[in-house]
Image (cartoon, rainbow, N blue to C red):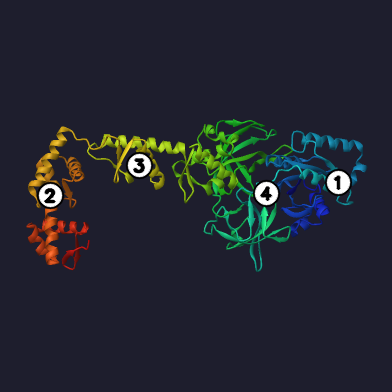
Amino acid sequence: MIIGTAGHIDHGKTSLVKALTGIDTDRLPEEKRRGITLELGFAHLPLDDGQVAGVVDVPGHERFVKAMAAGAGGVDLAVLVVAADEGVMPQTREHLDICRLLGVKAGVVALTKSDLLDALGDDWRALVEADLAALTAGTFLEGAPVVPVSSRTGAGLGDLKTALSRAGTTLPERPAEGPMFLPVDRAFSIKGFGTVVTGTLLSGTLAVDDAVALLPAQAGGRAGPFRVRGVQVHGQPVTRVEAGQRAAVNVTGVETEDVHRGMVLTRAGELPETSMLDVELTLLPAAEAPLAKRRKLLLHLGTAQVEATVALLDLDTLAPGETALAQLRLQSPVGALVGQRFILRGSRALPGRGATVAGGRVLSITPPRRRRGASAVVRPLLEADAAGQVAWLLRQAGYAGLMQTELFGRSGLGPKVLARTLELLGAKGQVLLVDREKRLYVSHDVFEGLRQRSLALLAAFHEREPMREGLSREELRQRLSAQLDARLFQRVVQALVDAGKVESEKDVVRLKGRGRTLTLGDEAARTRLAAELSAAGLAPPTVTELARKLGLSPEKLQELLKVLVAQGTGVRVSEELCFDANALAALRERLVAHLREQKEITTQGFKDLVGQSRKFIIPLSEYFDREKVTLRVGDKRVLRRG
């Protein structure tokens, strides 16, 4: 587990960690010179049960709350440090607010500088204890042990360690089966090894030789995958770490200057970066005023800090102490995990407690931009079990669907739980496996929507173009969506055919019982056109001449020519020439017979065979080439094999 300090500046957090662990977490020269903590510090503490806990020491000054929040994001157990001679102070309150909003479940209060208590008197001690009771009422620290301790004399250190060990037994385990997710709090280079990143593994497992990625990808830099060359926990090499442990990870293939606090180390391909989050949001009861929609605040998520616009989904304002659904629209992308806790801070401190104003948890990552009133879409996630969450994600994904690996990253469910959930939803007909190789799934609701849209598109097509036999498969797919997966489209068409709603013939799809429909006038025009082509033989009029001769518009003539071609009466040889099918078939027989006997034919020989001018000879010779009857060799043509 990870133990984190919290509390006001100069209340003795760093001294307490040093007294407990023997490690001075103030490592920067500036920290040594000024005597205050400016950055996150790290140590490890053997507990009474033999386990070794990671310790994160945070700055107490209000100017460095962003560093405190970065460290608190991975904390399981908080030590709220309160100096006996000063009692509860502004950062005491803000740090406790941050721990509460970030979901810390257990902790201990360390009353530091306890060697001063005797000199301060019983009345002062009673006042401090009353302030602590009021501060922690209704929080995870209500009723928690208050342990007097002195880093100078060592008094109470054993009691504090015992209290921490006991509190640790109540903690739930981190999700080791979830997506691998390690927010980076430091990055540095070691000669001979390269880039090392450190952080607390919040979810999943990480092992040597894993392929990993860093989110968000840097502009101009590689997004991954990178290889894990080595891993250390508490300074010792290990082959594998699990959620809840702090780790130093040696990553190859990435430059140290391209890595910074706020990035997330994930397994390659498991999680996308995102600039939008659906969230459940709570405004602190101590907030001075309601939170207005479209308010800009600073988001602290994991170790990242980024400006975010808070879009309330169903309220104009959020009152202090209330909870609502919202969407966070981020100024720059981050890596995020479903269920991850976050805080929001403003630019102005609340009286007596800092600038932290709100916090909550992530409900979905990479959502579309939500409109006002979209809370009904997001609300099911508040109570959703595994099946409900997966079904929701697939409905939101629409036609594109989601692969099982994408569902894993977006749901945060373990692989076994996710596989069982998909199997159960599949058996109930709520999801469809479209591509077994890719493990691509779509929602049944989306699939049914595709079926209904296909029927509507075909009905509109038949009304609009009655002389066409049907719509080509590819045209129907494009009209549904250019991005529609080909296998999914095939499943949609087959389902409609099986249901007796649609007929499919070669590459054409039509509604059952529908197809080409000609009016009496159209049928008469078609008959005249066929007779014209039949009479013309191998010297038909051009399309323009036919339209003029028959008194038809160019558009109508083109439709009638399509009908003749579909019926096998006419053959379109070029853009301007359509031949009678019988005349063309007879020419083909004579051409093949000639080539079998003579082995080849020249352009002049073909002209003599056809008995027409070059106006018809060239299009016809190119037509027979396209039809793979002839093969051009120099200025002659031969019969193609087969």
Observer able to see residue 580: no
Q: Nearer the viewer, mark 3 or mark 4?
A: 3
What residue would you read off at disc 3? Answer: 479
Q: Which of the two labelled residues, at mark 2 and mark 1, occupies the earlier sequence position?
A: 1
Element class at badge 3: helix
Q: Which amino acid type is shown beneath numbered disc 3?
A: Arg
Element class at badge 1: helix
Q: Nearer the viewer, residue 142 or 465?
A: 465
Left or right of 428? Residue 242 is right
Kindly report the distance in space between the C-alpha atoms of the residues bearing marks 2 and 4: 82 Å
Relative image position of residue 589 (x, y in whole percent): 13, 56
What residue would you read off at disc 2? Answer: 582
Q: Nearer the viewer, mark 3 or mark 2?
A: 2
Observer able to see residue 532: yes
The crowd level at tag 4 (other Cα within 10 Å; few <14, some 14-19, many 20+) is many
Residue sitting at 58 percent across and 49 percent down?
335
Residue sitting at 53 percent across and 56 percent down?
219
Q: Which amino acid type is shown beneath numbered disc 2?
A: Asn
Q: Which of the two labelled residues, at mark 3 and mark 4, occupies the earlier sequence position?
A: 4
Element class at badge 4: helix
Q: Which image quadrant is residue 173 in?
A: top right
Q: Which mark is residue 70?
A: 4
Q: Nearer the viewer, residue 345 or 322?
A: 322
Q: Which image quadrant is residue 90 in?
A: top right
Q: Which of the two labelled residues, at mark 3 and mark 2, occupies the earlier sequence position?
A: 3
Q: Which mark is residue 159?
A: 1
Q: Which of the two labelled residues, at mark 2 and mark 4, occupies the earlier sequence position?
A: 4
Q: Which amino acid type is shown beneath numbered disc 1?
A: Asp
The crowd level at tag 2 (other Cα within 10 Å; few <14, some 14-19, many 20+) is some
